[in-house]
Image (tube, helix red, strand yellow):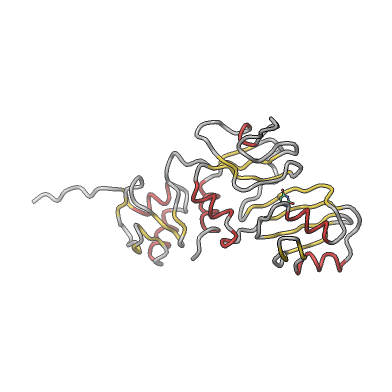
């Protein structure tokens, strides 16, 4: 009797093609039980249909849908991060391609510069912005005056804002008037209000990292698509396992 051709593509090959790792690395990932297909731990040699099967690596579901896009933008000052503005100011969505329609992941103030994601993946947006996932955001802040060690400690330990105390943050002085501050909350104007609260108003605020994503070479006003490694790193950062 002639056996029918098995359908689908070998899992390790699919993982390699979408940039998870080399074939050998993927074989190890599978052998270690770190890959699931449709919720079940996958076995080496399993065949999958990339368009229909849900593939998970280390708890992060891989985005393989070709219509999902995710752009990393270096937002310049003066551009607002809502989808449209009643006052007619330029918006971030006007900088990136208009099709497919994407939305900013969270917000940066008009005066804030730096990294901002735009995507049409609502699930990813939710996980990146929901405080329970605690994705880190790092900012380089130039403040007025030279913050004392006590002021830096206060920022680090948490300051009292009108919507409650801030969670512990990672804070380091950069030169005389610079502060690198990493938070995992995303309250309105949070960094500005924290710096106000310790007596050092913000002069310039730049977001330099979103979870695993950095790009010091991306110029203000420029954007690019995330590559597969970055998408995977992002999905890992928002997975709960
Ligand atoms: N914190 C702020 O104060 N503003 C931003 O745009 C982002 C974080």
Image x and y of residue 93, in percent: 61, 35
Residue in the image at 62% along x and 31% along y = 94
Residue in the image at 37% along x and 50% along y = 13
Give above or below for 70 relative to 197.
above
Image x and y of residue 125, in percent: 54, 49
Give above or below for 203 relative to 162.
above
Image x and y of residue 115, in percent: 67, 46
Q: Tally the numbered discs.
A: 0
Question: Along the horizontal axis of the image, is 76 left or right of 211?
Answer: right
Extreme-left residue of the structure: 1
Q: Quadrant of residue 162?
A: bottom right
Nearer-the-camera pick, 150 or 1: 150
Give above or below for 224 relative to 105.
above
Residue in the image at 44% along x and 55% along y = 61
Question: Along the horizontal axis of the image, is 171 left or right of 227?
Answer: right
Residue in the image at 52% along x and 58% along y = 236
Image x and y of residue 230, in percent: 55, 50
Q: Quadrant of residue 173?
A: bottom right
Extreme-right residue of the structure: 145
Question: Along the horizontal axis of the image, is 85 left or right of 38?
Answer: right
Nearer-the-camera pick, 137 or 200: 200
Question: Along the horizontal axis of the image, is 169 left or right of 103?
Answer: right
């Amino acid at each position: 009797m002639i056996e029918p051709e098995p359908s689908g593509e070998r899992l390790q090959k699919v993982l390699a093609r979408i940039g998870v790792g080399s074939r050998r690395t993927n074989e190890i990932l599978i052998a270690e039980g770190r890959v699931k297909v449709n919720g079940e731990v996958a076995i080496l040699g399993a065949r999958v249909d990339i368009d229909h099967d849900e593939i998970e690596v280390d708890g992060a579901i891989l985005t393989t849908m070709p219509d999902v896009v995710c752009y990393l933008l270096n937002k310049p000052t003066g551009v607002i991060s809502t989808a449209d503005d009643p006052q007619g100011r330029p918006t971030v969505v006007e900088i990136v391609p208009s099709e497919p329609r994407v939305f900013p992941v969270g917000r940066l103030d008009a005066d804030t510069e730096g990294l901002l994601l735009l995507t049409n993946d609502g699930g990813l947006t939710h996980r990146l912005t929901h405080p329970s996932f605690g994705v880190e955001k790092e900012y380089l802040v130039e403040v007025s005056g030279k913050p004392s060690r006590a002021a830096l400690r206060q920022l680090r330990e948490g300051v009292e804002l009108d919507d409650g105390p801030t969670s512990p943050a990672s804070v380091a002085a950069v030169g005389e008037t610079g502060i690198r501050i990493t938070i995992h909350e995303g309250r309105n104007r949070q960094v500005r209000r924290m710096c106000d609260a310790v007596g050092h108003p913000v002069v310039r605020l730049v977001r330099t990292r979103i979870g695993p994503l950095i790009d010091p070479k991306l110029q203000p006003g420029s954007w690019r698509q995330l590559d597969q490694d970055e998408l995977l790193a992002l999905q890992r950062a928002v997975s709960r396992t």
